[in-house]
Image (spheres, grey):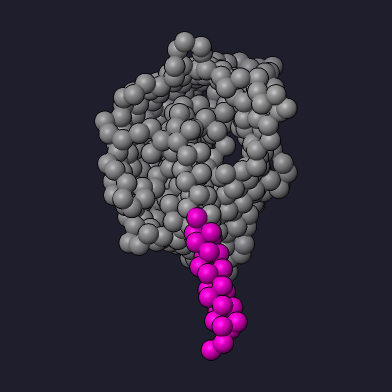
């Protein structure tokens, strides 16, 4: 081999190794940036997700604007009986594609680090009722008090500090979406004020709002409650608060754990020119003026490549001046995940709904299960994630009960966030394949 050829080969090899090392360094830097970004937003949904985003800074450096985005693309195959009540015949197999979420986030600080904000909008089907119209979801400002580290006030539109499953963003769930029980008891978005304080071992939140599921409403809208209060307290016995931004725990992670308790009370029916009840709240609320009490106890633990979460939900409703109208409903969720490689995570979930026996339904117990796997394209990063899961509904959900009670699609409904459509017999199946891209 001539000296020129040898020199060329050595130089080419060196360039290749340098390029590979550069790519590896970029991936490591990107992962580190994502983890640092999540750690900086360890408090209750302080920012816009884990994506690195694009940041602009004002000329004097006092203000910032970061743009993040989430895109989820999903295939669903649903299997039902060919003669299920309320649905008709020849509807035993339904499949197709959907975009459950297409979210854009803007977040940052204004003038100083103490005043922050988040504005988010979604084109996705789940958040817009299937119309693909752009709708504002998160829209709030937040001020952290000087001299009181960890204390803040939030004002605008956000999720009341109630069900933890709902407070963890969609891109950080174990399965492709939240549980049926979570959708049924969910608080969704509210408008109002929230005060919070985070210490080393505990944190607490108190909110005064227009009531659960009062997204994008005017102050006199019948959807809103007359008044609503929400409180949540959490106690951490291991790890950092940043660990609970998602439900996943990477390999080589330390042990972490927390427990939480929360409650929500609202009175409704007098707002909106006396319109009875309105169309808001969750599926368990009364359709006439009354009151609703929601409460939950939950716990999360994480370790070296494994995680577990469990929650108990309670719901009490009573209609005004209506005899025998008080109902107590309950729900449970239990899930766990474990990494079998650095990029493959297996998971399983059980959730159940137990309605009050006095409700006018033939069936009052409903059980669901989900099993699946996640593939993380970049180790220790949610930036690009593939999910494949199987969902099973063990009980009848249509015919004796309105399918919307469970967030199901049902007849004439465009969107099913749970991927179940409902049927008049037990054992409905759904298979989902999803790609989630976050930046």
The quadrant in which residue 150 appears is top left
Q: Is residue 420 left or right of residue 301?
A: right
Residue 349, compared with residue 47, is above or below; it is below
In the displayed image of the protein, which residue is found farthest to the bottom? Answer: 1
The residue shown at (26%, 30%) is: 237
Task: Answer whether residue 15 is magenta in the image.
Answer: yes
In the displayed image of the protein, which residue is found farthest to the front? Answer: 3
Residue 407: x and y in percent read: 52, 45
Q: Is residue 318 left or right of residue 212?
A: left
Residue 94: x and y in percent read: 57, 65
Residue 252: x and y in percent read: 31, 50
The answer to which of 149 and 347 lies nearer the viewer is 149
Let me know if residue 148 appears in the view: yes
Q: Magenta segment range?
A: 1-25
Residue 25, compared with residue 151, is above or below; it is below
Q: Main secondary structure of the magenta part?
A: helix
The residue shown at (56%, 83%) is: 3
The answer to which of 367 and 340 lies nearer the viewer is 340
Residue 180, compared with residue 39, is above or below; it is below
Residue 171: x and y in percent read: 51, 47
The quadrant in which residue 59 appears is top right
Q: Is residue 382 left or right of residue 58?
A: left
The residue shown at (60%, 82%) is: 4
The residue shown at (71%, 48%) is: 132
């Amino acid at each position: 081999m001539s000296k020129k050829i040898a020199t060329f080969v050595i130089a080419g090899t060196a360039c290749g190794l340098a390029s590979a090392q550069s790519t590896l360094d970029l991936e490591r830097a990107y992962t580190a940036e994502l983890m640092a970004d999540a750690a900086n937003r360890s408090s209750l949904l302080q920012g816009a997700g884990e994506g690195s985003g694009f940041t602009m800074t004002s000329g004097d450096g006092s203000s910032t604007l970061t743009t993040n985005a989430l895109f989820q693309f999903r295939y669903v195959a649903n299997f039902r009986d060919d003669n299920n009540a309320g649905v008709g015949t020849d509807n035993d197999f339904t499949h197709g594609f959907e975009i459950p979420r297409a979210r854009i986030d803007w977040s940052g600080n204004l003038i100083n680090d103490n005043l922050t904000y988040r504005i988010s909008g979604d084109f996705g089907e789940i958040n817009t009722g299937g119309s693909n119209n752009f709708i504002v979801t998160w829209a709030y400002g937040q001020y952290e008090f000087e001299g009181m580290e960890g204390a803040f006030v939030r004002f605008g539109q956000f999720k009341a500090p109630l069900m933890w499953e709902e407070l963890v963003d969609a891109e950080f769930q174990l399965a492709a979406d939240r549980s049926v029980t979570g959708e049924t008891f969910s608080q969704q978005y509210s408008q109002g004020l929230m005060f919070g304080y985070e210490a080393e071992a505990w944190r607490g939140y108190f909110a005064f709002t227009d009531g659960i599921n009062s997204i994008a409403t005017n102050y006199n809208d019948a959807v809103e409650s007359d008044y609503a209060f929400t409180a949540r307290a959490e106690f951490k016995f291991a790890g950092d608060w940043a660990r609970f931004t998602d439900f996943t725990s990477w390999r080589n992670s330390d042990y972490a754990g927390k427990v939480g308790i929360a409650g929500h009370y609202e009175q409704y029916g007098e707002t909106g020119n006396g319109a009875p009840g309105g169309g808001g709240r969750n599926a368990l609320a009364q359709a006439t003026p009354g009151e609703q009490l929601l409460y939950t106890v939950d716990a999360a633990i994480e370790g070296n490549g494994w995680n577990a979460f469990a929650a108990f939900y309670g719901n009490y409703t009573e209609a005004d001046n209506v005899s025998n109208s008080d109902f107590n409903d309950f729900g449970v969720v239990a899930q766990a995940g474990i990494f079998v490689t650095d990029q493959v995570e297996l998971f399983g979930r059980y959730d159940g709904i137990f309605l009050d026996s006095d409700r006018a339904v033939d069936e009052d117990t409903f059980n669901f299960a989900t099993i699946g796997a996640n593939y993380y394209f970049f180790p220790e990063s949610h930036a690009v994630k593939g999910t494949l899961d199987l969902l099973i509904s063990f009980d009848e959900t249509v015919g004796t009960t309105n399918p919307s009670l469970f967030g199901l699609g049902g007849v004439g409904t465009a969107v099913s966030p749970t991927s179940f459509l409902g049927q008049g017999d037990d054992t409905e199946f759904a298979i989902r394949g999803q790609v989630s891209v976050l930046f």
